[in-house]
Image (cartoon, rainbow, N blue to C red):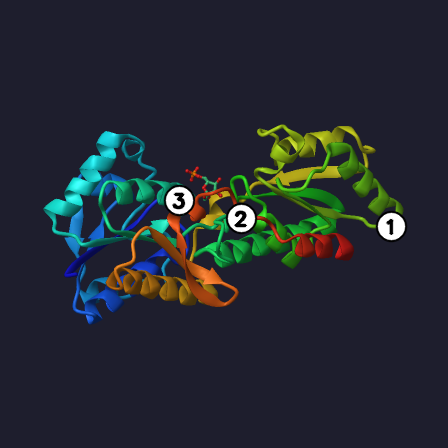
């Protein structure tokens, strides 16, 4: 193996740059030439590659987003796009590719493997929804960012005796909502994995009012509507429902931090994890491994076949959810 390439794909996540840095540094010290691919699979299809010397990743460990840039490539869904991507790898003499991304990116990676490429994945997504591992690069930062947002809202909620509904990212999973909900001291946490209904939310708010509680913080995963078979039901729908079904004295507001949760400098935990993933990905390639994702399970770095990494979504921790209900 002489040449490897690395790309970041799907939604950016804090720590992706730290992972690329580790791929470059570990790869170069193993005597490999490392190429960076711009704009994820789009850049691979259109041959946007450049050599990455050691110095090219200075100041990357601490930066958010993806300096290589990300894309959600439509062409990669087509066989023609996949073939072009593999052809680029051949044209550039790339012996192994590291794909840093989420489940969609790993589906693309599996297609490239089928067409003869050697690919290893590293889990870069804030959603923490990848099965077979405990953690994804960017999740810790997103949880910290959302916790910060909840802290900020708490001040106004308390000062004005308001009810806030805060919408967490996470696509179809509730990991960010659950973790930030607990760390932000939310009164109610709604996730797609556990059924709930609007009436019981109103009942909970009412019960808290009867107990003398003056303000309420509800953290709702963006996909929580799936649990009540209303996939498009979001924070603002719930705000309206609570507003219409509680006394006029209850003032309700919604807050959607949105992509703020995806940005910003990675936490120390994400930087360290990203660095471990980058190193493990290069080592997997050097060992001749193909078609796996590297990641952490029970504190150990493991390799998970890509086909398992895209099978469903990682479950939320029920014990943690029960704990959240006990302390709210
Ligand atoms: O997968 C990361 C994520 O931020 C999800 O939490 C969210 O549902 C989605 O990406 C948003 O995607 P986009 O930035 O393409 O709108």
Dot 1 beta carbon under 8 Å from ligand 1: no
Tell me which label, 1 or 3, sits earlier in the chain.
3
- Check disc 2 and report its element: helix, strand or loop: loop
Label 2 within 8 A of ligand 1 by Cβ: no
- Toward the viewer: 246 or 291? 291
Do labels 2 and 1 touch, CB within 8 Å? no
Q: Residues within 10 Å of mark 3 (few under 14, many from 20)?
A: many
Query: Which mark's residue is nearer the viewer, 2 or 1?
Result: 2
Residue 106 position by quadrant: top left
Give the labeled residue for mark 3.
11
- Distance (Cα) linking label 1 and label 3: 42 Å
Disc 3 is placed on an element classified as: loop
Outermost residue toward the bottom in this view? 29
- Whether tag 1 and tag 3 are in contact, CB under 8 A, the answer is no
* Label 3 beta carbon less than 8 Å to ligand 1: yes
246 left or right, relative to 133:
right
Pointer 2 with pointer 3, Cβ within 8 A: no
- Residue beneath label 1, please? 212
For the N terminus, the quadrant is bottom left
Residue 256, quarter of picture: top right
Say whether disc 2 or disc 3 marks the residue closer to the N-terminus.
Answer: 3
* Image position of 254 (left or right of 286): right
Task: Point out the quarter of the image occupied by ligand 1.
Answer: top left
Q: Distance from label 2 to label 3 (Cα)?
A: 18 Å
Q: Which residue is at 48% across, 54% downward?
A: 132
In this view, 12 is above or below 141: above
> Which one is in front in this view, the residue at disc 2 or the one at disc 3?
2
**What residue is pinned by disc 2?**
314
Relative depth, front residue between 138 and 242: 138
């Amino acid at each position: 193996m002489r040449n490897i390439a690395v790309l970041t794909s799907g939604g950016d996540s804090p720590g992706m740059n730290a992972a690329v840095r580790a791929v470059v540094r570990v790869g170069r010290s193993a005597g490999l030439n490392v190429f960076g691919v711009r704009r994820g699979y789009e850049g691979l299809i259109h041959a946007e590659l450049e050599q990455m010397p050691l110095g090219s990743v200075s100041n990357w460990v601490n930066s958010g987003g993806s300096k290589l840039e990300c894309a959600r490539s439509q062409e990669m869904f087509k066989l023609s796009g996949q073939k072009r991507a593999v052809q680029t790898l051949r044209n550039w003499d790339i012996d192994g590719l590291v794909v840093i991304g989420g489940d969609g990116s790993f589906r693309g990676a599996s297609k490239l493997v089928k067409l003869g490429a050697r690919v290893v994945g590293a889990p870069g997504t804030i959603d923490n929804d990848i099965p077979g591992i405990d953690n994804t690069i960017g999740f810790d930062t997103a949880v910290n960012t959302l916790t910060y947002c909840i802290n900020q809202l708490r001040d106004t909620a308390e000062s004005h005796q308001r009810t806030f509904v805060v919408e967490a990212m996470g696509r179809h999973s509730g990991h960010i909502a659950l973790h930030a909900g607990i760390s932000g001291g939310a009164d109610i946490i709604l996730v797609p994995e556990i059924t709930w209904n609007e009436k019981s939310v109103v009942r909970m708010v009412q019960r808290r009012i009867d107990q003398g509680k003056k303000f309420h913080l509800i953290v709702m995963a963006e996909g929580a509507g799936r649990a009540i078979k209303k996939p498009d039901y979001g924070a603002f729908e719930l705000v309206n429902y609570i507003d219409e079904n509680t006394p006029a004295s209850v003032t309700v507001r919604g807050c959607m931090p949105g992509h703020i949760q995806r940005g910003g400098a990675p936490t120390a935990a994400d930087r360290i994890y990203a660095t471990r993933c980058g190193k493990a990905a290069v080592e997997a390639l050097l060992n001749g491994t193909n078609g796996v994702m590297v990641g952490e399970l029970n504190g150990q770095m493991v390799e998970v076949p890509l086909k398992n990494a895209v099978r469903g979504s990682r479950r939320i921790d029920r014990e943690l959810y029960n704990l959240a209900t006990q302390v709210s």
